[in-house]
């Protein structure tokens, strides 16, 4: 594998207006994009704007009435409120790009070995409801597409965001051709968790040592029982000690060791990555943690 041959996709070419003071850090995607180029981690020639997902891809994971309700702004206030964002055409376009971008990531990873979206990991979106800043479920749409087209037989999802991926589990949790590992904060949102194939809940204040030991044990459990063809990696960095929405106490070094562990576990299987959550204050800490994930990937590959 040659790093210069890998492709990366971004969604920050679509600017989403949010009210002043909104807690969702929309600017982190642009800052990450800039940092990866400025620090010569990714060459601009490797970066591509994410295309929009088409309805056929969305309908594998979502109800048609829900998709049309999002696009046409016809969902009720009660239906839209759990998402936690304000409806705008730009928000819908950005969400469609996140799904389309991750689909491109999976195709690129299959042909080249590794690819990543500089966004995404929208694991709280259910078939008929969005929540937790997630409108559409990129992992579910991409996984069901690859399986239906018979491009892979089994997909392993490693979800290391501090928040449990309840949307991933509600859509994919009963399938035998997908295995979901979620390692998350026990006291974190969502407070009603939908069981994954393997859930590992960590107590508030868990440190690097506790986290990495739990991850190693979880990966060791998966290896003998699930012969996967491909990995989807949700590399959230809201496990960072300084994160405003996380309960764990991981350091930059701990997160980098986590990433290294995942890349080594992949053992040359195609790996498609999305960056997941991160809500530190100042936001530069989150951006640095995301940048570190790409540094580890570059060093590994």
Image: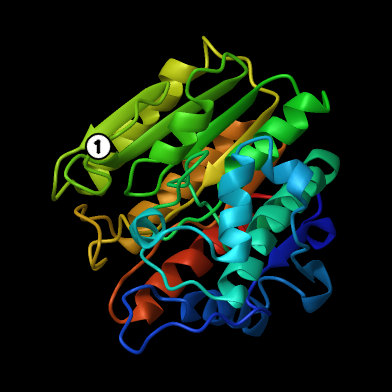
Residue 20 drawn at (x, y percent): 35, 89
Residue 147 drawn at (x, y percent): 74, 26
Foreground pick, 234 / 37: 234
Element assignment for label 1: loop
Q: Is residue 147 left or right of residue 203?
A: right
Colour scheme? rainbow
- Quadrant of residue 203 in the image? top left
Foreground pick, 160 / 60: 60
Q: Residue furthest top?
A: 225
Q: Residues within 10 Å of mark 1 (few under 14, many from 20)?
A: few
Q: Is residue 19 left or right of residue 105?
A: left
Q: Is residue 14 above or below residue 272?
A: below
Residue 87 drawn at (x, y percent): 49, 71
- Quadrant of residue 140 in the image? top right
Whether residue 57 is visible, yes or no, is yes
Q: Is residue 108 above or below residue 75?
A: above
Q: Residue furthest bottom?
A: 20
Whether residue 113 is visible, yes or no, is no
Residue positioned 45% across, 30% down in the render: 170
Foreground pick, 8 / 131: 131
Residue positioned 38% across, 85% down in the render: 19
Residue positioned 29% across, 30% down in the render: 200
Residue positioned 14% across, 47% down in the render: 204
The image shows a total of numbered marks equal to 1
Per the image, the residue denoted by label 1 is: 192
Residue 9 drawn at (x, y percent): 72, 64
Q: Is residue 144 above or below residue 255?
A: above
Q: Is residue 66 above or below residue 230?
A: below
């Amino acid at each position: 594998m040659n790093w210069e041959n890998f492709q990366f996709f971004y969604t920050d070419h679509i600017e989403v207006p949010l009210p002043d003071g909104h807690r969702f850090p929309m600017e982190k995607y642009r800052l990450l994009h800039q940092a990866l180029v400025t620090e010569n981690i990714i060459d601009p020639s490797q970066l591509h704007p994410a295309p929009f997902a088409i309805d056929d891809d969305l309908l594998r994971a979502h109800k048609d009435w829900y998709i049309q309700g999002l696009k046409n702004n016809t969902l009720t206030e009660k239906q839209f409120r759990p998402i936690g964002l304000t409806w705008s055409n730009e928000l819908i376009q950005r969400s469609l790009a996140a799904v389309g971008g991750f689909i491109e990531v999976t195709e690129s990873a299959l042909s080249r070995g590794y690819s990543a979206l500089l966004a995404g990991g929208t694991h709280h979106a259910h078939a008929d409801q969005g929540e937790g800043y997630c409108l559409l479920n990129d992992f579910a749409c991409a996984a069901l597409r690859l399986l239906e087209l018979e491009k892979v037989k089994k997909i392993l999802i490693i979800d290391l965001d501090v928040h449990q991926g309840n949307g991933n589990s509600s859509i994919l949790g009963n399938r035998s051709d997908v295995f979901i590992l979620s390692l998350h904060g026990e006291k974190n949102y969502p407070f009603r968790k939908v069981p994954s194939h393997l859930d590992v809940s960590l107590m508030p204040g868990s440190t690097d040592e506790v986290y990495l030991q739990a991850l190693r044990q979880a990966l060791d459990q998966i290896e003998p029982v699930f012969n996967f063809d491909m990995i989807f990696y949700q590399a959230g960095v809201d496990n960072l000690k300084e994160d405003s929405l996380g309960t764990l106490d991981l350091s930059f070094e701990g997160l980098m060791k986590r990433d290294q562990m995942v890349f080594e576990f992949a053992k040359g299987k195609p790996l498609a990555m999305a960056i997941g959550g991160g809500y530190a204050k100042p936001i530069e800490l989150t951006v640095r943690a995301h940048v570190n994930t790409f540094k580890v990937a570059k060093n590994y590959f």
